[in-house]
Image (spheres, coloured by chain):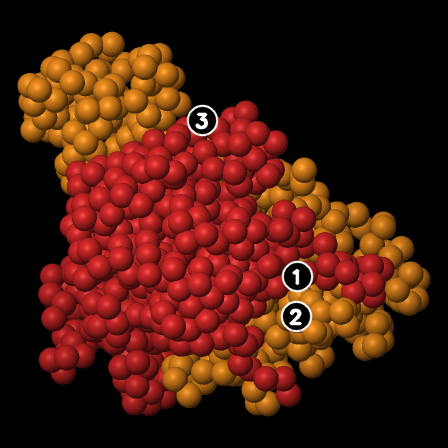
Chain colours: A red, B orange
Amino acid sequence: MTSTQPARGMRDFLPDDVRRRDYVVEIVREVYDRYGFEPIETPAAENIETLLGKYGEEGGKLVFKILKRGEHEASGQADLALRYDLTVPFARIVAEYQAVLPKIFKRYQIQPVWRAERPARGRFREFYQCDIDAIGSTSPMVEAEQIGAVAEVLDRLTFQDFTIVLNHRGVLTGLLDASEIAPERREPALVALDKLDKIGEQAVEADLVTRGVAPSQAARLMEVLRTITGHSGNEQRLQELHRLLDETPHRGAVENLGAIVRLVAATPAAARVAIDPRLARGLSYYTGAIMEITVPDLPGSLGGGGRYDNLIGMFLGSDVPACGFSLGLERIVVVMQERGMFPAAASQSAVDVVVAAIDESAQTAALELASTLRRSAGVRVDLYPDVAKKMDRIFKYVDQRKARFIAVLGSDEVAAGTVTLRNVAQKTRDTMPRADVASFIQTTGKT
Amino acid sequence: MTSTQPARGMRDFLPDDVRRRDYVVEIVREVYDRYGFEPIETPAAENIETLLGKYGEEGGKLVFKILKRGEHEASGQADLALRYDLTVPFARIVAEYQAVLPKIFKRYQIQPVWRAERPARGRFREFYQCDIDAIGSTSPMVEAEQIGAVAEVLDRLTFQDFTIVLNHRGVLTGLLDASEIAPERREPALVALDKLDKIGEQAVEADLVTRGVAPSQAARLMEVLRTITGHSGNEQRLQELHRLLDETPHRGAVENLGAIVRLVAATPAAARVAIDPRLARGLSYYTGAIMEITVPDLPGSLGGGGRYDNLIGMFLGSDVPACGFSLGLERIVVVMQERGMFPAAASQSAVDVVVAAIDESAQTAALELASTLRRSAGVRVDLYPDVAKKMDRIFKYVDQRKARFIAVLGSDEVAAGTVTLRNVAQKTRDTMPRADVASFIQTTGKT
């Protein structure tokens, strides 16, 4: 017999899981809708060329590839691949539909992505991303609005202690230059820096050297980063960055960072943003501001994003400015669950009433009653399908379904046109005309 | 440059598409919830053994397979496959979680599936199924409730002319026996019969012969089917089936069909069900009643289902009775769109107001105003990110966003604490205190 487990690193969601996830997704969707983002969806599989070369060397290894079909299957070649993020498919969409999309276009997209990572706590091979992206503007208003939208989502979910960490790829380049790290070592250096969270400063410094950065340069970079983060407060860090980079080509990046921070003050993210020059972000396509959401008790982040002004050009031939922010559904759900942040209603699987026929002759009446009750506002109705010889079975089922009432129909009830309605919690029962059952259930408050 | 089209047979959904799909999914979910079904979700990819051997020879060829990763990639072997339907993953779930699931368990699942079919109008390689299934009972109440639930979904979507065609695998076996078709030819015969819709009676008769049925037997089967369908009305067809099969081991199948039809009369599907002995259904796992929804102007069906009492046993070792019904989201959306059945609100992408700063100094005020308005009930707010040098650009954008109002902020407005609010349709404008904008928008009715 075949195994009944889900594939490695992937998960099944039972009813309570699905309801909790839907609760989060509903709030995300509502906020993004209210912010004027429009929904789009793309296929799970993309032509393999669409994804190749977009995620850097590390990322590319983690793409799930789909075997050609039919006579080509034996070749072992792949022509499709599973979506690795929502950004590259979005860039493809912008290129494909540029004639019909507005020049300035804001979209949200809530769909799963697949990465063949080694599974770990809170890291899965299939997970949902909730992305917002905007194309067509280089204004820092874009970053500010997105940071505000994300903060509003987290506020609505009752997160109280998140920080949106902010940095800029141009600032990072400036700091690498200031440490005399050569341009061809920039990308490896960012890969090393991206691990700071996980492995700490010393290990990053060693990793920089492994990746070809001279020990003195690595030491200097770490020193520069320490100097900036020695200042607390965004204004002080900005001043330090200005001091370091104002005479370099990267002055504009610092100014951009400052503009974003000032604009964010007018959004729900006002008290949430913290400039941190150590933030690197893994993906290679970022060109400007980068951001990441952290909460104290979670290694890694709840989400992140940044500006990527060149990616769409890889599909379109001419560049289109773009910026996006992605929330990780799984991470959010894990933290909310561990902290007991879900309201009871978020995983409420209770039905109001189970209708049960105790004679075969009452089955039609049971179905009729169920149909009538289902037309009554707000009443969730289950039907016990078997003719129960013993009430015990029904009681057990009703208990599992967390039903408030049992509507029992036997030959007596059918003959009299009545229903015996049992109140499960109060262990009472009333026999009443069928027509009265709906309002009785509606008016008996949920406890 | 890489192609920007989606993969063959798969589709991108732009905002209006997504909203229409969500409109349908919301109704499906609401009805299934009200009927006491519980949501579950499973991963897109399954271990390949889970899917192999479940769909018959034809089906198996259409499964998308995922290449092993890392050092095993070069072997060309596949270890995972994309979900082909929602029934087999559900059967796996039932086996895996039997200790925690109720013995009688009703679930719904709304997720995409993938099949490498030749794409055609209304046939895609990625499509959503909306499935309900119930395990643990052999009662015809199960079929009746599911048929009722599906009819209620279609009613709510305002379909007026659908038929739920009903047949039974046991009846089909009986009719094949009555035509003296040997047991080992049954499965090929059903494959031929399943094409009746598409290729007509004569071609099916020829196809039966191609598949090893003797010409006289093929002719006899077609004759038997004609005799039954010569009667109109379920009662007459049931009588004819009783006449043909009462002295055979398949009498029980006819009785089951009759019980389902009588119970359905007590559901919202009362006038919708039609027994048709020609209905075969493609999948090999059905064991009892089978059903399919047809509408006059669509070749193929809007959905279908049936009883499959042995499939879960393939995972569990012991059989668990089960029955399910699947709605095809794409088919439903295609028909509704062709017939203009979507209410205007179903693809409503309008925002209420676009906030625009016309001076850089007004950007903070614009973000503040947008944040305030977004906290106001029911107001959907977009922010024009650039400092527009010409109002033309803003007007063009506002037109694309179908906004009712433009809230303009320049240095004058900032100095005075006001906003200039333009009513797009009436081409009027009012300058008002910032605090008054929200209620002005809320009280100016949508036209």
Q: Chain of mark 1?
A: A
Q: Are marks 2 and 3 on the same chain?
A: no
Between B172 and A233, the one nearer to me in the picture = A233
| Number of other residues with Cα within 10 Å of mark 3, as a class: few under 14, some 14 to 19, many 20 or more | some
How far apart are labels 1 and 2 at the CA level?
8 Å
Cβ atoms at labels 1 and 2 below 8 Å apart: yes
Q: Nearer the viewer, mark 2 or mark 3?
A: 2
Between B244 and A226, the one nearer to me in the picture = A226
Q: Chain of mark 2?
A: B
In the image as oriented, which residue stretches furthest toward the front?
Answer: A216
How far apart are labels 3 and 1 at the CA level?
33 Å
Q: Which residue is mark 3?
A: A102
Q: Which mark is residue B69?
A: 2
Q: Which mark is residue A65?
A: 1
| Number of other residues with Cα within 10 Å of mark 2, as a class: few under 14, some 14 to 19, many 20 or more | some
In the image as oriented, which residue stretches furthest toward the top?
Answer: B427
Between B143 and B130, the one nearer to me in the picture = B130
* Residue type, mark 3 in image: Pro
* Residue type, mark 1 in image: Lys
Residue B345 placed where, x, y %?
A: 35, 34
Residue at 67% x, 66% y is B66
Q: Secondary structure at mark 1?
A: strand
* Residue type, mark 2 in image: Arg
Residue at 26% x, 57% y is A227
Q: Secondary structure at mark 3?
A: loop
Residue at 32% x, 15% y is B389
Residue at 30% x, 86% y is A396
How far apart are labels 2 and 3 at the CA level?
40 Å
Q: Quadrant of the N terminus of chain B?
A: top right
Residue A445 placed where, x, y %?
A: 11, 65
Residue B268 placed where, x, y %?
A: 41, 54
Above or below: residue A125 compared with residue B384: below
